[in-house]
Amino acid sequence: MKRISIFIVFIAICLTAFQSYSQTFGLKGGLNRSDVLYENESGKISDATNMTTQGFHVGVTMENSLSEMLSLETGLLVSLKGFKIDEYLDGVIIRNKTNLYYLDIPVALKAKFDLGKKSKWYVAAGPVFDIGFAGNYVTVYDWHGDSQAVKEKIKWGNNEGEINRFDIGITTGGGIEFGLWQVGVYYDFGLTNIASDAKPENTLKNRLWKVSVGYKLGSK
């Protein structure tokens, strides 16, 4: 709770500090390719297997102009992240998939450079604060051509078998703006170990590639 309070205060300070400058509101959405940094006493499991899953992100953004070149962009995005692990046991294929729904609050500093004809390219980086609000585990058992799926809700918390609700990470990326449209590619990496019951040698951290399309609604 202390960490999320710090997140909220930080965001409030950022938005208040730049409220005298022009603000542009917009919509953003796109595709996610997510997995996790998964490491235990045996090494990095994520280096040895494909854990990538598909997801999405969608929401609203607000960009505060600081100068002709610099701006501060934040927003509120619903984002589906997660990972998968496939296992083989006595001829049975066990496919485990974890789906995690977050509210993402990025606070990225953007630097823009003219390309001409009302187009610009940009780079951006900054912290991103994530709040988990829903999710599920889906396990599919395949054997001899038959399959059975079992679904269980995610439990958020700090106890054994639960997932940490709050995550903080870094978002980096870049793209092109042309008129009211924006297309970008971002990479987010979580800094928080989201496995609540993890031993000191165990690590589970979010990793995410995003392809985003944004549209500017208007300015204030």
Image (tube, rainbow, N blue to C red):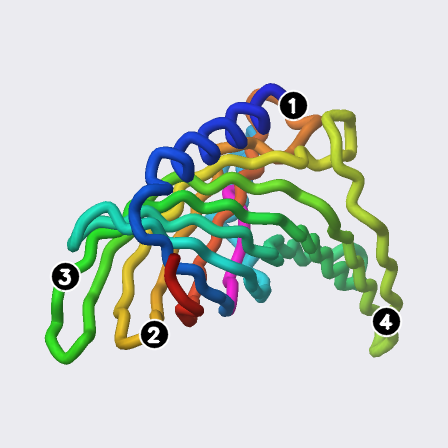
Q: Is mark 3 on a helix, strand or loop?
A: strand
Q: Is mark 1 on a helix, strand or loop?
A: loop
Measured as percent of width and height from the top left, residue 131 is found at 62, 41
Q: Which mark is residue 180?
A: 2
The magenta stretch is: 31-37
Q: Which amino acid does label 4 sit on?
A: Ser
The residue at which mark 3 appears reads as 113
The residue at which mark 1 appears reads as 1
* Mark 3 touches mark 1? (CB < 8 Å): no
The residue at which mark 4 appears reads as 147
* Mark 1 touches mark 4? (CB < 8 Å): no
Of pointers 4 and 2, the one earlier in the residue sequence: 4
Based on the picture, tell me whether residue 179 belongs to the magenta stretch. Answer: no
Q: What residue type is labelled 3?
A: Phe
Q: Distance between the residues labelled 1 and 4?
A: 41 Å
Seen in the picture, residue 133 relative to 204 is either above or below; the reply is: below
